[in-house]
Image (spheres, helix red, strand yellow):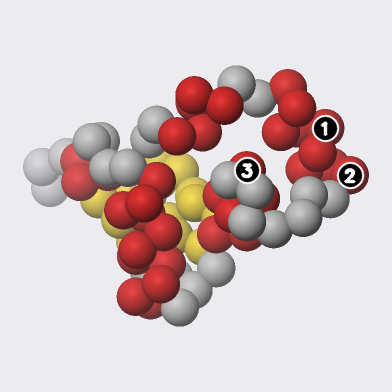
Amino acid sequence: LPTLSWQAIQHARVADVLEVFRETNVMHLLVVETVGEAADTVRGLFSKTRIERHLGYLPATNAATSHAASAPKQNIQRL
């Protein structure tokens, strides 16, 4: 599973994350934070399908429709 640095995605756009999906041809990206010599901490997981559904690229499923209806659109566009 490819990983993205927490520090690197702090100012990333959704388009940047989608570009990584295109380059790696995977469905999920793990976001990890490394602080000093401590073990990595998992900060999040991006789902290509979920992002595409929120952006209207894919038809929504019942579960995705109810979640998308309650999620503010501006939060989807900011990472």
Residue 54 visible in rendering: yes
| Residue 42: numbered disc | none
Is 27 left or right of 3, judged from the image as shown? right
Could you say which disc has been placed on residue 54 in the image? 3
Q: Is residue 39 visible?
A: no
Vertical arrangement, residue 65 with respect to residue 60, above or below: above
**Labels 3 and 1: the sequence-earlier one:** 3
**Residue drawn at x 40%, y 40% as measured from the top left:** 43
The disc placed on residue 62 is 2
Q: Left or right of 35: which side holds 13? A: right
What x and y, as percent, mark residue 59?
Answer: 77, 55
Tell me the crowding category of disc 1: few under 14, some 14 to 19, or many 20 or more residues within 10 angstroms, Cα based: few
Tell which residue pokes out farthest to the front in this image: 56
Image quarter of the C terminus = top left
Instruction: Report the amino acid beneath label 3.
Output: His
Please tell me which of labels 3 and 2 falls first in the chain: 3
Question: Which amino acid is tagged 2?
Answer: Asn
What distance separates the C-alpha of mark 2 from that of mark 1?
6 Å
Q: Secondary structure at mark 1?
A: helix
Characterize the local packing of mark 3: few (<14), some (14-19) or many (20 or more) Cα atoms within 10 angstroms. Answer: many
Q: Are marks 2 and 1 in contact (CB under 8 Å)?
A: yes
- Decide if residue 33 is on the left or right side of residue 63: left
Q: Position of residue 1 (x, y in %)?
A: 44, 70
Q: Which mark is residue 66?
A: 1
**Element type at marker 2?**
helix
